[in-house]
Image (cartoon, rainbow, N blue to C red):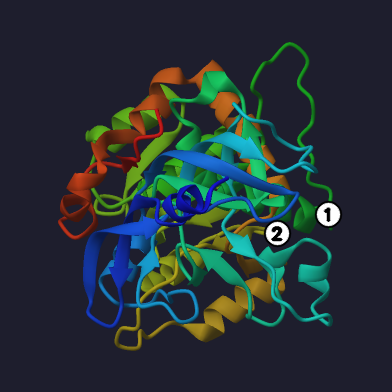
């Protein structure tokens, strides 16, 4: 390659949506296009990126850290792309494959057992980095280069819904831990001969946003009787969506937490997807014996809320209950999410397709990242195809 050609390559730029934390500004910038630098690197042409509450919080200045020495952070962590180039040692994917990249990267410390075991989602030190969130550029751009270790291949027939894989990993990781926790007791459902879809456990999902609705689909696919518990009274678009995959919808305005177990019966699992701590702990008072309560929301700092700690502790002890929090996900959760998306598409195609409310070009990013949230899941198209 000639010197002039090399200079041209070095100057090649791409569009990216970036936040400038120091200025509290959001811009469509021109960013250097990345190239392969290692034998296991993969170059992806990005197709689309989902917008979530984390992106909005970063844009509003609540958090988000640019890579070292930079003044902006390319945002976006829910994504789908297509491999266009691969290093000589790449074996997991090949050019032409659809892929969903993982978000978190391990900390550098040798004493972090989780990161050294490939489970940076359980990092002990907190010195991990995250694409589009913490010290690494994200996916709302035209091209990305990353190691094949962080790529999960997606079947071509999931092209229209695969951008939902990353938010679905939240529920997948929760389910993985629920099954592990409940191996402590006799919990398996008896097989009922000739009765398809029989279930013996009830899961209540708090919230009807994208994480909540994806969680409800995942619990339904796993054989739980699934109840979505949200604020707005039925009928509404979320309750209609629940009808499509056999979930029940209960409004907190008509059935307060104190009446929830009376309305739906014993609650075995709660999957919280609201970030509303007061609401979550009010529901926690009413879960059943041996139940598991999963917290996934990250509430903002508000005024302290009064809760009945004696009642909560008494219930936890005397009813053998478990409460845990979960965040981010490892490879197995991404692979489970891709498998479950295929299940959703096979069993409830209309329901899963309705989760994506709209797709918008990069030039419209400000309307959907700064304006009022609308729909369930809005997606930015990145020009990949």
Q: Is residue 141 above or below residue 385?
A: below
The numbered dot on residue 185 is 1
**Residue 200 at x, y = what percent?**
67, 36
Label 1, secondary structure: give it.
loop
Front-most of 223 and 275?
Answer: 275
Instruction: Give neighbour class at mark 2: few <14, some 14-19, many 20+ (Cα, 10 Å).
Output: many
**Residue 310 at x, y = what percent?**
55, 85
Q: Residue at x 83, y 80 (%)?
A: 110
**Residue 365 at x, y = what percent?**
22, 51
Front-most of 187 and 169?
Answer: 169
Q: Is residue 157 above or below residue 24?
A: above
- Is residue 268 visible in the rendered image? The answer is no
**Residue at the spot of label 2:** 290
**Residue 57 at x, y = what percent?**
32, 68
Quote the CA–CA distance across marks 2 and 1: 8 Å
Q: Residue at x 28, y 35 (%)?
A: 359
Label 2, secondary structure: give it.
loop
Q: Residue at x 54, y 79 (%)?
A: 311
Instruction: Give neighbour class at mark 1: few <14, some 14-19, many 20+ (Cα, 10 Å).
Output: few
The answer to whether residue 327 is left or right of residue 13 is: right
Q: Is residue 34 above or below residue 125?
A: above
Q: Residue at x 15, y 51 (%)?
A: 367
- Is residue 74 visible in the rendered image? The answer is yes
């Amino acid at each position: 390659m000639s010197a002039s050609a090399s200079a041209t390559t070095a100057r090649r730029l791409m569009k990216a949506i970036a936040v400038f934390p120091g200025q509290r500004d959001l811009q469509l910038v021109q960013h250097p296009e990345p190239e392969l630098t290692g034998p296991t690197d993969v170059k992806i042409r990005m197709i689309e990126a989902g917008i979530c509450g984390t992106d909005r919080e970063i844009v509003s200045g609540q958090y988000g850290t640019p890579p070292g020495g930079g003044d902006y952070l390319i945002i976006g962590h829910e994504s789908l792309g297509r491999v266009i180039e691969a290093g000589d040692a790449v074996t997991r994917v090949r050019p032409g494959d659809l892929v969903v990249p993982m978000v978190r990267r391990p900390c550098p410390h040798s004493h972090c057992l989780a990161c050294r075991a490939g489970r940076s989602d359980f990092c002990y030190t907190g010195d991990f980095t995250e694409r589009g969130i913490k010290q690494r550029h994200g996916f709302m751009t035209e091209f990305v280069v990353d190691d094949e270790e962080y790529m999960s291949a997606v079947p071509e027939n999931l092209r229209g819904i695969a951008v939902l894989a990353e938010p679905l990993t939240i529920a997948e990781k929760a389910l993985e831990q629920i099954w592990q926790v409940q191996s402590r007791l006799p919990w398996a459902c008896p097989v009922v001969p000739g009765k398809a879809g029989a279930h013996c456990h009830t899961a209540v999902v708090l919230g009807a946003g994208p994480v909540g609705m994806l969680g409800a689909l995942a619990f339904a696919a796993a054989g739980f009787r699934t109840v979505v518990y949200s604020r707005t009274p039925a009928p509404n678009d979320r309750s209609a969506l629940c009808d499509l995959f056999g979930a029940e919808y209960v409004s907190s305005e008509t059935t307060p937490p104190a009446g929830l177990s009376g309305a739906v019966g014993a609650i075995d699992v709660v999957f919280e997807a609201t970030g509303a701590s007061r609401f979550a702990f009010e529901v926690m008072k009413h879960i059943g014996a041996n139940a598991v309560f999963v917290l996934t929301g990250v509430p903002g700092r508000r005024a302290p809320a009064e809760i009945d700690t004696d009642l909560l502790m008494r219930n936890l002890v005397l009813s053998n209950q478990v409460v845990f929090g979960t965040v981010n996900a490892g490879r197995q959760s991404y692979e489970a999410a891709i498998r479950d998306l295929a299940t959703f598409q096979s069993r409830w195609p209309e329901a899963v397709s309705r989760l994506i409310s709209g797709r918008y070009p990069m030039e419209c990013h400000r309307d959907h990242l700064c304006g009022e949230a609308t729909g369930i899941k809005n997606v930015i198209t990145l020009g990949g195809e």
